Amino acid sequence: MIAAFAAVALFLFFADITRLYRSWRSQSVWEEFETLSYTLIGTILGLLLPAYATKTTSTYSRLSIGTWWVSLPVYLTIKRGSFVNPIMPTNLMILIGFGAYGPA
């Protein structure tokens, strides 16, 4: 449980440093993937270096850490890419209501 909390805290810390959550319109999907990779490298090193220094790396599953490290950027890149749809306009707004801006 402590490792999961540390992983989330480190990920949010490095995401803030690399500005991972800036506007997705300001960069391409590849640049977003690159920023995410830097964030994950910082997070993994932030988790592994203290674990190696305290000799507790044997308690963490290499399979689960490796699966998380590989699947997260792929998932987020696919999810981010699915929002970029050239057919559907992203600035569409519908006003529904009565009064000054709706039907009288």
Image (cartoon, grey):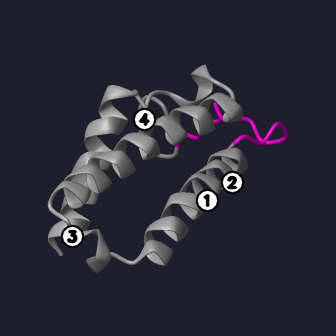
- Residue located beneath label 1 in the image: 75
Q: Give the Cα distance between marks 4 and 1.
A: 16 Å
The reply, left or right, for residue 29 in relation to residue 52 is: right
Q: Which residue is the site of mark 2? A: 78
Examine the image and state in which quarter residue 27 appears. top right
Give the mark nearest the N terminus, 2 or 3. Answer: 3
Disc 1 residue crowd, few under 14, some 14–19, many 20+, Cα 10 Å:
few
Residue 56 circle label: 3
Q: Give the CA distance from mark 4 to mark 2.
A: 16 Å
Residue at image location 43% in from the left, 39% down from the top: 39
Segment tinted magenta in the rendering: 84-95
Quarter of the image where one finds residue 54: bottom left
Disc 1 to disc 2, how far (Cα)? 5 Å
Q: Are marks 3 and 4 in contact (CB under 8 Å)?
A: no
- Against 35, residue 60 (above or below) is below
Q: CA distance from mark 2 to mark 3?
A: 34 Å
Q: Is residue 104 visible?
A: no
Q: Is residue 88 left or right of residue 35?
A: right
Q: Position of residue 50 (x, y in %)?
A: 19, 53
The residue that mark 4 highlights is 21
Tell which residue pokes out farthest to the right in this image: 87
Badges 4 and 2: C-beta atoms under 8 Å apart?
no
- The amino acid marked with disc number 2 is Ile
Going by the numbered disc 3, the residue's amino acid type is Thr
